[in-house]
Image: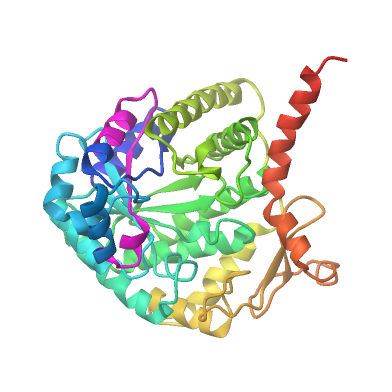
C-alpha cells in the first residue's frame, strides 16, 4: 500500500501514535533541515512539506519572484511548482525512507498540476479533497473542483508507486461545524478517492470544543469508514484544534495535550500537531520539534494511564445516526460520489455553516450549546435535527459569533491566569 500506510500500520502495531507537523519553508536547504529534524526527533513521526500561498492559488510567477529575490525566505511554505520535480526529488532523496515517509500539504482547489509534479517526484502522500479544498479556500465552482480532483486521484492511483491520499473533509473551516457533518464529509471524500482508484487513504477529523462529543464523532467516523471502505487500507488523522488558538504557552500546550489524549482514547492512528507559535507566526524548526516531542510524551503517558484507569466515555447524542443520514441522503443524489456531492450542495442537503462559497447554500447555522457542544441552531435543507429551544436561542450577533470563535482560546488561556494567581503571594 506504500510507505506512508506502512509507517502508520507499523506504529499502530506497536501502539504508538504517529505525530506530524504542518511545516513548510521556501528554500530547499531549510526544508530539508526541517524534515531531518522531524525524522530524528524523539517521537514517532512522518514528515510534512507544506506549500506556500502563491502555489496554492496557482500564482507560480510570484513564487518564482520570491525565490529570485531572497531565496524564498519570505514565503510561508515550499513553492513546489516553482522548484520543479527534480528539486523535489533531490529534497526527498535520503530523507524520505521506509521509516519516514513525507506528505505534501497544499490547500489547492485545482491541484492537477501539483499532482503531476508530485507523481514525477515520487512523493509518498498528499491530502485535500473536492469539497474540503474548494469551499473554504476560494471561488472555484464545486463541479470544476470535483472534475479536477477526479483526474488527480486517477493520476495518483496510476503512479508507479501509488500515493496515499488524506481527505480534509473532517476539518471544514476549522471550527463551528457540527461533527456529524465533518464525519459525513470525510467519509464521502474518502469514497470519492476510492471510486477514482485509490486504495490507501486516511480520513480526517479536527478537534472541536467538547471531549465527549469528539470521542463520539471519531467512533462514528471509524464505523462509517469500515462500512464504506471495505476494500481500502485506511486510518484516521486527527488535527489539533484548528480554530482561534490560545495565546499563552500554557494554554497552547494544554490544548495540544488534550488533542493528544483525544487521539489516544479514540484509537486514532495519526495526529497533526499545532505549535504554540502558530497563534502569532510561522513556527521555527525547533518549535515544531518541541511540539512533536511533547505530543509523543503525552501519548505514551495517556496510553499508560488507560491501561490502569478508565478512559473518558464518548457522548451519546445520536451523532452516528445523523452522520449516516447525511451520507445516505447525499449518495441518493448521483450515480457517483462526485456527482452526488455536487448535487447535495446545490440542493442544500449538505450545507457548511458560515461558509461563504457561492456553491454552499449558507442556510445552516451552528452554536456552542449549554453543554459546551456544537449543535445545529438552523438546519436549512439538511436532514439533521435542531433540538428544541436552539432554533429560538436568539439572534446570532457579531458579538456572539466572536465569542464562540474564541471559545477555546478563552477556556485554555484561563489556565494561565489561574496559574498566575496561584503563584502570586498572598
Q: Residue furthest right?
A: 426
Confirm whether the magenta stretch covers residue 146. no
264 relative to 217, above or below: above
Asked whether 100 or 111 is in front, the reply is 111
Quadrant housing residue 188: bottom left
Please identify the quadrant where the C terminus is shown: top right
Does the image show residue 226?
yes
Asked whether 371 or 59 is in front, the reply is 59
Q: Which residue is drawn at 62% across and 69% down?
A: 354
Q: Which residue is drawn at 62% across and 32% down?
A: 254
Does the image show residue 374?
no
Q: Horizontal and vertical percent for residue 240?
A: 53, 43
62 relative to 270, above or below: below
Asked whether 70 or 123 is in front, the reply is 70
Left or right of residue 239, residue 364 in this image:
right
Q: Which residue is drawn at 44% across and 38% down?
A: 283
For the record, the magenta segment spans: 32-60
Q: Which residue is drawn at 44% across and 43% down?
A: 282
Amino acid at each position: 500500500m506504500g510507505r506512508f500506510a506502512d509507517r502508520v500500520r507499523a506504529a499502530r502495531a506497536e501502539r504508538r501514535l504517529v505525530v506530524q507537523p504542518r511545516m513548510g519553508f521556501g528554500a530547499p536547504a531549510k526544508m530539508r533541515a526541517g524534515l531531518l529534524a522531524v525524522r530524528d526527533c524523539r517521537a514517532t513521526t512522518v514528515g510534512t512539506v507544506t506549500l506556500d500561498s502563491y502555489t496554492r492559488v496557482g500564482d507560480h510567477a510570484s513564487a518564482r519572484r520570491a525565490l529570485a529575490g531572497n531565496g524564498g525566505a519570505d514565503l510561508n511554505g515550499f513553492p513546489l511548482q516553482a522548484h520543479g520535480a527534480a528539486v523535489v526529488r533531490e529534497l526527498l532523496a535520503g530523507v524520505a525512507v521506509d521509516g519516514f515517509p513525507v506528505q505534501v500539504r497544499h490547500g489547492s482547489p485545482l491541484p492537477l498540476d501539483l499532482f503531476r509534479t508530485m507523481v514525477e517526484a515520487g512523493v509518498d502522500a498528499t491530502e485535500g479533497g473536492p469539497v474540503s479544498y474548494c469551499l473554504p479556500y476560494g471561488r472555484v465552482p464545486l463541479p470544476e473542483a470535483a472534475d479536477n480532483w477526479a483526474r488527480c486521484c486517477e493520476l495518483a492511483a496510476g503512479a508507479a508507486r501509488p500515493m496515499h491520499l488524506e481527505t480534509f473533509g473532517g476539518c471544514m473551516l476549522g471550527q463551528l461545524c457540527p461533527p456529524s457533518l465533518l464525519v459525513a464529509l470525510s467519509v464521502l471524500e474518502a469514497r470519492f478517492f476510492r471510486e477514482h482508484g485509490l486504495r490507501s487513504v486516511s480520513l480526517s477529523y479536527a478537534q472541536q470544543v467538547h471531549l465527549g462529543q469528539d470521542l463520539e464523532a471519531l467512533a462514528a467516523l471509524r464505523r462509517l469508514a469500515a462500512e464504506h471502505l471495505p476494500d481500502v487500507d485506511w486510518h484516521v488523522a486527527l488535527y489539533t484544534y484548528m480554530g482561534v488558538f490560545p495565546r499563552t504557552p500554557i494554554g497552547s500546550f494544554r490544548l495540544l495535550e488534550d488533542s493528544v489524549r483525544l487521539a489516544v482514547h479514540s484509537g486514532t492512528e495519526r495526529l497533526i500537531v499545532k505549535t504554540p507559535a502558530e497563534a502569532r507566526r510561522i513556527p521555527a524548526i525547533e518549535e515544531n520539534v518541541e511540539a512533536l516531542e511533547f505530543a509523543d510524551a503525552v501519548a505514551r503517558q495517556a496510553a499508560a494511564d488507560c491501561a490502569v484507569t478508565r478512559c473518558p466515555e464518548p457522548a451519546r447524542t445520536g451523532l452516528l445516526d445523523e452522520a449516516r443520514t447525511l451520507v445516505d441522503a447525499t449518495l441518493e443524489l448521483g450515480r457517483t460520489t462526485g456527482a452526488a456531492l455536487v448535487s447535495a450542495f446545490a440542493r442544500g442537503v449538505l450545507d457548511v455553516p458560515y461558509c461563504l462559497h457561492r456553491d454552499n447554500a449558507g442556510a445552516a447555522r451552528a452554536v456552542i450549546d449549554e453543554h459546551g457542544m456544537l449543535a445545529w441552531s438552523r438546519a436549512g435543507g439538511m436532514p439533521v435535527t435542531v433540538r428544541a429551544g436552539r432554533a429560538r436561542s436568539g439572534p446570532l450577533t457579531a458579538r456572539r459569533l466572536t465569542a464562540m470563535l474564541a471559545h477555546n482560546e478563552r477556556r485554555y488561556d484561563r489556565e494561565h491566569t489561574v496559574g498566575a494567581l496561584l503563584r502570586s503571594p498572598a
